Amino acid sequence: MTGISRRTFLRRTGMVGGGLLASAALTACGGSSGGQAVSSGKVDLGVWTHDPGYVKTFTEMAKKLTDAPGGKYDYNLKFTQADSEALVTRMVSQGAAGTGTPDLIGIVISVFPRVMNGGIGKQLLLDLDSTIAPVKNDLLRTAPYTIDGKLYALESDTCLSVLYFREDEFKKNGIPEDVGTWEELAEIGARLHQKTGQSLGMVSTGDNTSVTNQFLQLLLQRGGGYYDEGGNLILDSPEAVEVLDFMAKGVASGFLISLPDPYGAPNTAALKNGKLIATVMPNWYNIYGLQSYVPEQKGKWRMRNLPRFKGGGHIASALGGTGFAVLKDKPGTTAATELLRQTYLTREGQLLRFQKGGFLPTLKSLYQDQEFLSTEDEYLGGQRLFDIYTPASQDSPTFYQNAKLNVLIEALGGPMLETLQGKKKAADAIKEAVAAYNAKKGG
Amino acid sequence: MAAVTERRTGSGAPARGSGLTPYAFISPFYLLYGLFMVVPIGVGLYLSFTEWAGLGTPLWIGLDNYTRLLDDGSFRTAVVNTLLYTLFAVFVVVPTALLVAQALNARGLRGRDFFRLTFFMPVVLSPIIIALVFTLVYDREFGLLNAALRGFFGWGGIDWLGEPSWAKVSVMFLVLWRWTGYLTIFFLAGLKNIPRELYEAAEIDGAGRVRSFFTVTVPMLRPVTAFVAVTVLVGTAQILEEPMLLTKGGPGEATLSVAMFIYREAFTRQQLGYAAAAGVVMFVLVFAVGRAAGSLFGVGKGR
Amino acid sequence: MATRPAGTATRPAAGAPTVPAGTTRRRRPSGSRGLLYLFLVALTVMFALPLLWAVTSSFKPRGDIFTYPPQPLPIPFTLENYTRLLETQPFWGWFLTSTVVAVLSTTLSVFVCSLAGFAFAKYRFRGKRMLFDVMFSSLAVPFAVIVVPLFVVLVKAGVTNVYFSLIVPWVAPAFGIFMMRQYVEQAVPDSILEAGRLDGASEFGLFLRVVVPLLRPALGALAVWSFLNSYNSFFWPLIVVSDPAQYTLPLGIQALYGAEGRQVDMVLAGSVLAAVPSLIMFLLLRKQLLDGLTAGAVKS
């Protein structure tokens, strides 16, 4: 056994050794390998995504474009599915090695700050400004995927936050469905909890990302934020203190229930046994949360726009999202851009995305489109979705990202959790987080 | 007994006939090391003096990363936490594994295979499932652990994952759960190598089970214990998965480990230069402590 | 080699008459036996429950997986999670990659490590201390720091074969070498090697015919380690494998979980199937692990 395998082994490793000498210069790497750009005909595209919904959508659209009379490209898509962190890790390492990057990649919003660092986005991704030019003012959300004023990815899902609630439980307990403000709802929730032990919302007390997500959702609604358009930290604000204080008081009164995150076993348990009968989450939570965790509660849930904060703000918020980006300077770059444009910037493409993956339109005008407006949702008791989404889309806050977002999340998570546990004042927690952030954000 | 081990390991290594033979025997490691490790390690060391996001040309910044590490509260927390995990693994997990191995090695034990198979199960379970199961166990409100406490003692309001000190305990318990059964395999292999006559002789000398454990098992198992303890030490000093699965380092950074810190800097924040500096510091610490522990156990003594 | 137990000469216990095993067994107090079983059963419950939970949950429909309080039995019972996994994902491809890589890695590394461990334990040679330290130090190299440079090295060297990248760089792990060095020290007396040399055995022959048989339990343990180490590895395959059909199991399962809807149902089915090869491997190596021959029992 040893003779043969060792000889082969030595030959192989010798081969590697040769290449090794040439590889010492890591510094010379970067960018993608060139090659002749494909301007028509057969084109192979690597598409990387974390979600099967995009696989279905792009497959369908590529087929349509290929089959269309006079279609320019004969698309052949090769999908790689992996979790969102893994995709970026792999794209950057492939970029460093100078080969094997995808042509089209979906980058989840929370992972996008990674490509905002060290010019990664600029080196690998195509600037989409000219692609979106014709519909620029019709696009709902571009800020989270913008680096230095240039757009590098197209939002897939507008992610409008709404209030989901159990219609049956609300009726039973005499809770009106149209409570106007958070403050009123909090009072009702506290009373309800006293009486029945139920809660009208949740806060996350799990990992730092979950803890801060729930806060961010309400903070954006209140009109606050983490960063301004110029990338400056604006967390140290009265809005932030107010929202955190509101959450902490809600936990103390039982209006809100503490759960590790809105997805796992404890959350499912709270939904199943009727402890949690309302929750603020984005549109996708209908399919990926409620319908998959509590399918048996079909017909009992409804949604509505968020109650306002007395102090002001919006009637909607956002959490999550995925931006699709095109890798630049590759043979397939133009073809990939065209595929993305057809899928994301046309009415036909947006309808397809909604049907195949449940992704909300990203063009403002489509929120008035009859075909969308007439959509009803069986799980939500036949509710017309866009009765809620359309007003939400017209009053949704803007979220600005930052390369150092993760530093902020890790700095904020600890003090925020302590506040929710009733061990710290909201104002002190925000101060502490901001100080820690400034000390740790580095150069 | 010391004399026995001394005799087995000390003298008598062949001076003759060896020549190039030992070099040939160990060569595969050094060949692969030369081909695959030397350059990456060198690059890693170089990167620790630079600012690099993973793409493009690294920017030389001298010792800046290292001075920044000294000031970084997160890194200090991570070092302290890692130290706690490591002490726990070496002084609790390893002895527990030895105890369990001893129990499994009991003569005439029924169901030995069954027990060994079940003890091995934690390491074949996918990490995602482990994370799912343990959130079911540890949750404050709906967790099985608090439910059990409530059942037995009428009180069970511990926030296992949300309270900084309990969260550390929870991570340590996960380490114990995940690795104890697996480590028994190594001890069992070592116990099999102890000649039965030694126990029989000890028994004739009137030694009870406890005494023969200390006069026969412990000394005869010394090289194996050394191996297990040192690799557990070196491995736990680089612990990543358990806190990642359970708490992602939280609450706050209460369960953050050094390896997580490095991973976070490199692959969440794209600070690969800073991560490399932390990696160099960790390497130096782990190697020094691992080597010292090895010497303490007499690894390579008299060679 | 002599026919009598070879190691006996070096042991003080050698001359002692053998006590029949039955006698000792009967002499044990039954109370402590009861405690022993109680201890082992308690551990069994603790160690096996999560896997059992995964098995039963994998037969539940998605909405029933997290019922509260948890239901032990899958009622209603469904195979849907498995059929959907196998129909919509290249699961057998993942299974094949992981298993082939793990088996090849294990075979190679058990051989390479035991040989090197033997050399470190039983030979004197120049530079040994230094070489050992270099080898040992590689245990402490933080993987997250070298992974990107290593990947770049492989790509620049033109290595694109997934199997090569997954196996070759890791077939001589320091862990295994250190491990085998320690077991050789424990289990192989010098006298037995001397005797072999006097009989004219070559050094490699000595390794194969004398050392390997004595090391059987340790080789089993090393094989278990090596298999799991390869089979469970996540981060390196993540970097080097981009074709989903060639994913390893941990990568594939992570991808299922990473989708928007956290496809817990398929993750459970996949994890249960993924556990099977490790358990089979453990059962196959059971004899190896169990039936250690001690030096005292070696016959020529």
Image (tube, coloured by chain):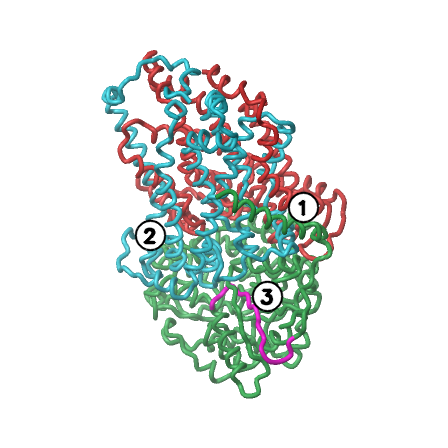
Task: Examine the structure image and report whether residue A51 is included in the region drawn in magenta.
Answer: yes
What is the magenta range? Answer: A38-52
- Residue carrying label 2: C55
**Residue at horizontal 69 percent and vertical 69 percent from the top:** A150
Using the numbered discs, state the Cα–Cα distance from disc 1 to disc 2 in whole angstroms: 44 Å
> Measured from the top left, where is residue B148 in percent x and y?
33, 42
- Residue carrying label 3: A102
C98 or A263: which is nearer to us?
C98
**Residue at horizontal 38 percent and vertical 35 percent from the top:** C289
Q: Residue furthest bottom?
A: A69
Q: Residues within 10 Å of mark 2 (few under 14, many from 20)?
A: some
User: Which amino acid type is marked by label 1?
Assistant: Val
Q: What mark, if any, has residue B39 been given in the picture?
A: 1
The image shows residue A322, relative to residue C15, as above or below, that is below
Residue A438 visible in rendering: no
Which type of secondary structure does the marked residue at label 3 adopt? loop
Q: Main secondary structure of the magenta part?
A: strand
Report which quarter residue A312 is drawn in: bottom right
B6 or C68: which is nearer to us?
B6
Q: Colour of chain A?
A: green
Q: Which chain is red?
A: B
